[in-house]
Image: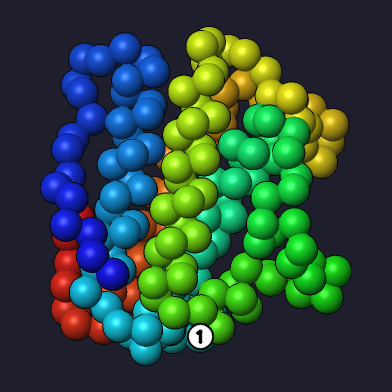
């Protein structure tokens, strides 16, 4: 995997939309950079008793992107590979599936999911607008909530990836 893109810090005094979207893009790139230069075997390295790997974190993040922007925001639950995943048998299907894929396949899915998310976000003109789809409780979500939630999700998973990457080759930092 190659994450040669340079990190750009979010604006210190941007609009709400600029701040949230650039912060999300920042964390997306940090996660990709954690995988940069790793081969397929290294993408499957686990730390301690956890089943998390950098590969599973990337694939899970692809699922999260499609879940929030496609399923929740646009009410479209037909996005593959998630729509045909065997969720009834395996609640962590995306993690199990990631272990069977190459790094290139994981990165391709991740990039496709992020691209779909960026298109959906570009269509949202108001961060207070509510999603077409609903969560388990039947509630809709504002785009603002979705962006903040994804920033939180990525920040947590970038921390996981940082620890795993350090255990692989000592690399630290963004």
Asked if residue 58 can be seen in this view, the reply is no
Q: Where is residue 132 drawn, in percent x and y?
A: 74, 25
Q: Dividing the image into 4 quarters, which one contains the N terminus?
A: bottom left
x 62%, y 13%: residue:
129
Please state the horizontal and vertical placement of residue 163, each as a whole percent of the image: 31, 71
Image quadrant of residue 139? top right
Image point (68%, 50%), residue name: 79
Q: In this figure, which colouring scheme has been used for the structure?
A: rainbow
- Give the camera-side residue of 98 and 119: 119
Q: Position of residue 75 (x, y in %)?
A: 74, 34
* Residue at horizontal 74 percent and vertical 66 percent from the top: 85
The image quarter containing residue 120 is top right
Q: Answer few, some or many: residues within 10 Å of disc 1's Cα (few below 14, many 20 plus, some between 14 and 19).
A: few
Q: Is residue 152 above or below residue 52?
A: above
In the displayed structure, 150 sits above or below 157; it is above
Residue identifier under label 1? 49
Left or right: 128 as drawn, with respect to 74: left
Q: Is residue 16 visible?
A: yes
């Amino acid at each position: 995997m190659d994450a040669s893109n340079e990190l750009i810090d979010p604006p210190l005094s941007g609009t709400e939309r600029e701040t949230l979207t650039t912060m999300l893009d920042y964390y997306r790139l940090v996660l990709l950079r954690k995988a940069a230069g790793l081969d397929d075997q290294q993408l499957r390295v686990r730390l301690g008793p956890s089943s998390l790997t950098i590969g599973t974190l990337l694939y899970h993040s692809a699922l999260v992107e499609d879940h929030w922007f496609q399923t929740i925001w646009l009410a479209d639950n037909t996005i593959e590979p998630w729509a045909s995943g065997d969720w009834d048998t395996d609640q962590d299907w995306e993690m199990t599936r990631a272990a069977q894929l190459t790094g290139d396949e994981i990165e391709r899915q991740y990039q496709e999911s992020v691209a779909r998310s960026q298109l959906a976000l570009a269509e949202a003109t108001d961060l207070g607008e509510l999603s077409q789809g609903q969560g388990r409780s039947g509630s809709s979500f504002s785009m603002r909530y979705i962006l903040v939630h994804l920033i939180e999700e990525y920040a947590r998973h970038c921390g996981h990836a940082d620890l795993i990457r350090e255990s692989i080759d000592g690399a630290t930092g963004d």
